[in-house]
Image: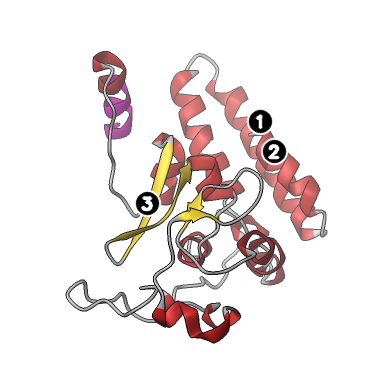
Amino acid sequence: QILHLLNDLQAEFGSAIIMITHDLAVVAEVADDVMVMYGGRAVEHGTAEQVLVRPNHPYTWGLLQSIPAVSSEQAELYPIKGNPPSLLSLPPGCSFAPRCPYVDRVPDGKCRTDLPELISRSAGDHGLSRCHLSNPDAIFAAEVSNIAVAAGDPARAVPWAELALAKADLVLATNPENPTFVLDQMVAANRLGIARSQTGDHQGAKAAFEVL
């Protein structure tokens, strides 16, 4: 109700809204642009689709992997190891380096000594990232997005399902005259995507979720 009220006020006054939250479902539902912060600095910035579907920073990957499963099956979460740094004494280089599982992928210990710039790191439709990895899109596709599939929970492998459920809530709110039909279509497409992921048809799963 609060989110819908904010949307109504935004439409009425023609204003922008800055929302600070850790709830990625809220981000998926209401945000046009997303900035991911860590250690008091922006580490990733782009449209909601760029950041949630094609993220380039390991901290964003960790946030997405820690989303609870949308399927009915219980599965292990993938929390980010370690603790956030003190803002009074940030580590040199990348603030996320002490917790980053990919820090050794960058030669010469650069992550621990040099603060990366917030720039585009991948070709194609990606946002900005503050990370020294030279091929973050390839790492995400080959290693990160397949973790949940290997663990038997493809619904959490990438945020397509989370985005789908957030969009379902928005569609139901804007189409109250026929909510049962809309919800049935959303649930059917979501189940289809999960089933395709479980059989290894990742492209088919992506297509099913993107329909939503």
Return the mark for residue 118: none
Residue underneath mark 1? 185
Q: Regarding mark 3 in the picture, which secondary structure is present there?
A: loop
Evaluate whether residue 43 shows in this view: yes
Which quadrant holds residue 75?
bottom right
First of labels 1, 3 by sequence position: 3
Q: Position of residue 211 (x, y in %)?
A: 68, 33
Residue matched to label 3: 23
Gap in Å between the C-alphas at discs 1 and 3?
Answer: 25 Å
The amino acid at mark 3 is Asp
Let me know if residue 81 appears in the view: no
Total numbered circles: 3
The residue to which callout 2 is attached is: 189
Instruction: Read off the magenta span.
Output: 1-8
Magenta includes 66?
A: no
Looking at the image, which residue sits at the far left?
Answer: 88
Q: Is disc 1 placed on a helix, strand or loop? A: helix
Evaluate if marks 2 and 1 touch, with contact meaning CB atoms under 8 Å apart: yes
x, y (%) of residue 149?
A: 70, 65
Are discs 1 and 3 less than 8 Å apart at CB?
Answer: no
**Residue drawn where x is 41% and y is 75% of the image:** 114
Q: Residues within 10 Å of mark 1 (few under 14, many from 20)?
A: few
